[in-house]
Amino acid sequence: MQRLFLLLVACAAMLGSARAGEVYVIPLKGEISKAQFFFVRRGIKEAEAAKADAVVLDMDTYGGDLEAATEMSDALGGTTLPTLTYIDTNAGSAGALVALATRRIYMAPVSAIGAAAPVDSSGQDLPSTMQDKVASYFSGYFRSVAEKNGYNPDLAEAFISKTAGVKLGSVVIHPAGTLLTLSAQEAAKAVDGKPVLASGIADSLSDLLTKASLGGTVHTVDPTGFERLAFWLTTFAPLLLLGGIVGAYIELKMGGFGVAGLVATLCFLAFFFGSYVAGLAGWEVVIVFAVGLGLIVSEIVIHPGTIIPGLIGLLLACGSILWAMTDHYPHEPLIPTGSMVERPVLNLAITILLAGIAIPIITRYLPDTPFFRFIALARAQPRGPSFSGRTVDSPTSLAVGETGVALSILRPSGNARFGDSIVDVITRGEFIEPASPLRVLAIEGSRIIVARG
């Protein structure tokens, strides 16, 4: 009986050595860029949501944007899943630094990693002082990344700086004077019982999975054509929000749905679409935002003065906007921490500040522009029988300074009564409720410009 028990334990141990869950493979090919960062981040979040056993970067890159490399490193360092890199065939420059952000590195038999000195956008060396400054920062950053993942931090510094050498015990791996580049055999070489960098050499991705004891289904994350678009949309998120807010404000003033409403809709859709493609948020935030916007509109148009619906709508709209800009991972708490919302709050604050400047300027000057006259006249109710059965009269009998009363909401156009006459009027952008006293400011052809009297 005891032998049977020991046999069952041994079998369970053997079965447990190969993990049976999904392995998410994220191809990292070509130039390291912000668009690729969005792709990598999305892949990590999908893997976490699926409770995968591991994330594998399938890498072949000569390098790219160091800032994007640091963002990838932060994303890889923030996940709770085991992370690996398979270098097939190159991990040059920024790619080498991203590889250091994973917990294990495997390399194809003919492959190399290293040479990560900072250069300018054209590939030329930076000026001496700038080179020293940039190299100092990134070497410090990636030293800490390497040390966190169990690698010799001197390797990270030697990848970036020519002045750094690498020595393991009594063995000099790399003398100072040149940038460090390691072949697969050099990286996997054992010194004092520990590999210089790579956990092993694998003939293929499937060979890596076998050597890393990763079983189960392999799920390859496919890049989309929208990742690059997502970079631009998220970069200009404050301007998209500004366009949406200002467009919505003008539309509420004008009433109906026209050019301003279309601009606002497109801006908000572009903002949320960019967040979705970048892996920051799902479409549920769009639903929350739409509910919030609906409550705000109902407060203004249907039952003004009740306050509560508008306040709830404002909280929902602002909350969904902040959520759409927050980099939240599935393993993290639902309520984000202060560091997570720092940038979203800053973006929203910038947007509100710009809107606070733009709206008064638009209110003051837009009504005097030909474009405003065109859309205002197009929206004005046509002359003829009104909903009350009364006839809209000609404005020729009115004079500047006459007083009357609004019969409809002026947003900014609508109907008003002056004496026995009902006429179409327009404000200079002011929102005026029905039954409010009015005063004629000017008469320009068929346009009667009024203000609250």
Image (cartoon, rainbow, N blue to C red):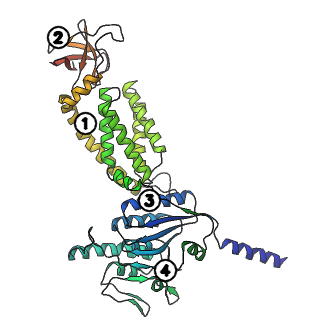
Numbered circle sitting on residue 200: none
Marks 4 and 3 sit apart, C-alpha to C-alpha, by 25 Å
Marks 2 and 4 sit apart, C-alpha to C-alpha, by 88 Å
Discs 2, 3 touching: Cβ within 8 Å: no
Marks 3 and 1 sit apart, C-alpha to C-alpha, by 37 Å
Quadrant (top left/top right/bottom left/bottom right) for the N terminus: bottom right
In the current view of this chain or complex, which residue is farthest to the right? 1
Does label 4 or label 1 sit earlier along the sequence? 4
Is residue 35 among the parts visible in the rendering? yes
Q: Label 2 sits on what residue type?
A: Thr
Q: Position of residue 407 (x, y in %)?
A: 30, 14
Q: Which residue is mark 1?
A: 359
Q: Which residue is mark 3?
A: 39
Q: Label 4 sits on what residue type?
A: Ala
Quadrant (top left/top right/bottom left/bottom right) for the C terminus: top left
Q: Residues within 10 Å of mark 4 (few under 14, many from 20)?
A: many
The local secondary structure at tag 2 comes to helix
Q: Is residue 54 left or right of residue 232?
A: right
Q: In percent of the image, x 34 and y 33: which residue is there?
A: 261
Q: Which residue is mark 2?
A: 396
Does label 1 or label 2 sit earlier along the sequence? 1
User: Toward the viewer: 291 or 275?
Assistant: 275
Q: Label 3 sits on what residue type?
A: Phe
Q: Is residue 285 left or right of residue 175?
A: right
Q: In percent of the image, x 57 and y 58: which residue is there?
A: 50
Does label 4 or label 3 sit earlier along the sequence? 3
Q: Which residue is mark 4?
A: 198
As drawn, 165 above or below 344: below
Q: In percent of the image, x 67 and y 71: which residue is there?
A: 16
Q: Position of residue 302 (x, y in %)?
A: 40, 24
As drawn, 452 above or below 110: above
